[in-house]
C-alpha cells in the first residue's frame, strides 16, 4: 500500500521513563533542611492550591520550640516598651494640662459656703484670664498673701467683688461699689450670701458687721471676699490682690458627684 508522508510526521519510539525511581532534575522544590531549627511539614499529594500547578501539597516550615520561645520573649519585650511609652506620654500630657490649662483644687474651709462646701473639688481654668478680663462675680483661686499662707494652705478661693479703679465700702451693713469714673456708688446685690451654720441670720450679712471703710482699688488689683462673710478671711483682712497672683477661674464643681455644677 502506498502512503503519503509529510516531513516531521514520522515518530520515534518513546523511551521508557524512570521518573518513578529518580527525582526530576528540573523540579525546583528543595529538600527539607532542618539545620535552622525548623521542621518541614509537607502536605499529602493533591493538597496544594489548584492554581499552583503542582501535583503535590505545599510545604510549611514550623518553628522549633527554642525558636518559638525566642519569638515570644521578643514580642513581650516589644509590648512592654510600647506600654512604657504610653504611660510616659500620658504623664507628660497630664503635666502639660495641669501646668497650662486646668487644675483641680479641694476646698478646706467653709469660707465659700453655700456655693462651695468643705471637701468639695473644683476645676480651675488657668487660661481664662489670658483670653478675657476678670469679671465681677468670678470665683478665683489665687496664691495666698504672705500673712495668710500656712504649711497646708498655699492658695485661697474667693469671689471677685471690686475691679481695678473702683471704690468699695460698707453702708448699712451692705457692700457698695463706685465704678471708675463715677461719683455715686450702688449697692451690690449678692444672692450668694446666705445664712449658714457658721453664720446664722443674726450675724450673716454682706459685711457681717465688720468694718469696711472706703477703699480705692489700685490698677492691676482686685477686691475679693468669701460668700460666707462671717467665716471668711478676705480682702477685708489682707487688702486687694494682684492680678498676677490669680491662678485661674473656678468654673465647675466636680465633686461630690451629686453636686456637679458649673459655677
Image (cartoon, rainbow, N blue to C red):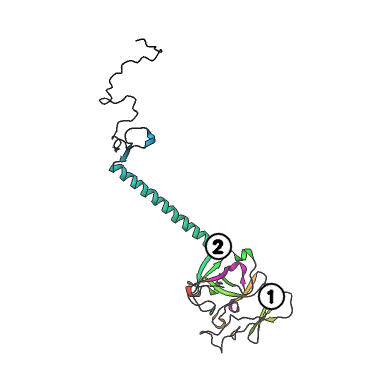
Give coordinates of residue 175: x percent, y percent: 64, 82
Using the image, tell me which numbered label, if any, was put on residue 101: 2
Mark closest to the chain's N terminus, 2 or 1: 2
Residue at 55 percent of width and 62 percent of height: 101
For the point 62% across and 70% down, the residue is 242
Q: Are marks 2 and 1 in contact (CB under 8 Å)?
A: no
User: Which stretch appears magenta?
Assistant: 235-252
Residue 88 visible in the displayed image: yes
In this view, the residue farthest toward the top is 2
Name above or below for residue 199 compared with residue 146. Answer: below
Q: Nearer the viewer, residue 225 or 154?
A: 225
* Residue 57 sits above or below residue 156 on the image: above
The alpha-carbon separation of the residues under discs 2 and 1 comes to: 30 Å
State the residue at coordinates (29%, 43%).
Answer: 66
Secondary element at tag 2: loop
Q: Position of residue 127 (x, y in %)?
A: 59, 64
- Residue 78 falls inside the magenta stretch: no
Q: Quadrant of residue 205?
A: bottom right
Q: Secondary structure at mark 1?
A: loop
Q: Residue 64, percent across and down?
A: 29, 41
Farthest front residue in view: 1
Amino acid at each position: 500500500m502506498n502512503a503519503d508522508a509529510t516531513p516531521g510526521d514520522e515518530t520515534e519510539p518513546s523511551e521508557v521513563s524512570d521518573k518513578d525511581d529518580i527525582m526530576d532534575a528540573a523540579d525546583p522544590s528543595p529538600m527539607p533542611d532542618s539545620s535552622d531549627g525548623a521542621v518541614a511539614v509537607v502536605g499529602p499529594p493533591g493538597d496544594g492550591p489548584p492554581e499552583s500547578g503542582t501535583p503535590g501539597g505545599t510545604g510549611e516550615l514550623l518553628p522549633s520550640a527554642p525558636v518559638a520561645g525566642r519569638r515570644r520573649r521578643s514580642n513581650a519585650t516589644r509590648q512592654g516598651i510600647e506600654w512604657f511609652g504610653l504611660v510616659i506620654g500620658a504623664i507628660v500630657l497630664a503635666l502639660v494640662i495641669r501646668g497650662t490649662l486646668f487644675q483641680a483644687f479641694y476646698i478646706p474651709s467653709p469660707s465659700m459656703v453655700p456655693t462651695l462646701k468643705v471637701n468639695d473639688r473644683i476645676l480651675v481654668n488657668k487660661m481664662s484670664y489670658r483670653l478675657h478680663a476678670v469679671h465681677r462675680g468670678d470665683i478665683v483661686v489665687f496664691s495666698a498673701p504672705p500673712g495668710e499662707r500656712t504649711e497646708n494652705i498655699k492658695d485661697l478661693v474667693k469671689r471677685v467683688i471690686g475691679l481695678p479703679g473702683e471704690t468699695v465700702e460698707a453702708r448699712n451693713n451692705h457692700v457698695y461699689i463706685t465704678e471708675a469714673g463715677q461719683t455715686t456708688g450702688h449697692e451690690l446685690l449678692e444672692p450668694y450670701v446666705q445664712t449658714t451654720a457658721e453664720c446664722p441670720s443674726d450675724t450673716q450679712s454682706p459685711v457681717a458687721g465688720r468694718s469696711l471703710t472706703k477703699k480705692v482699688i489700685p490698677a492691676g488689683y482686685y477686691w475679693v471676699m468669701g460668700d460666707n462673710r462671717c467665716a471668711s478671711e478676705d480682702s477685708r483682712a489682707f487688702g486687694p490682690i494682684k492680678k498676677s497672683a490669680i491662678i485661674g477661674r473656678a468654673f465647675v464643681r466636680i465633686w461630690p458627684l451629686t453636686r456637679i455644677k458649673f459655677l
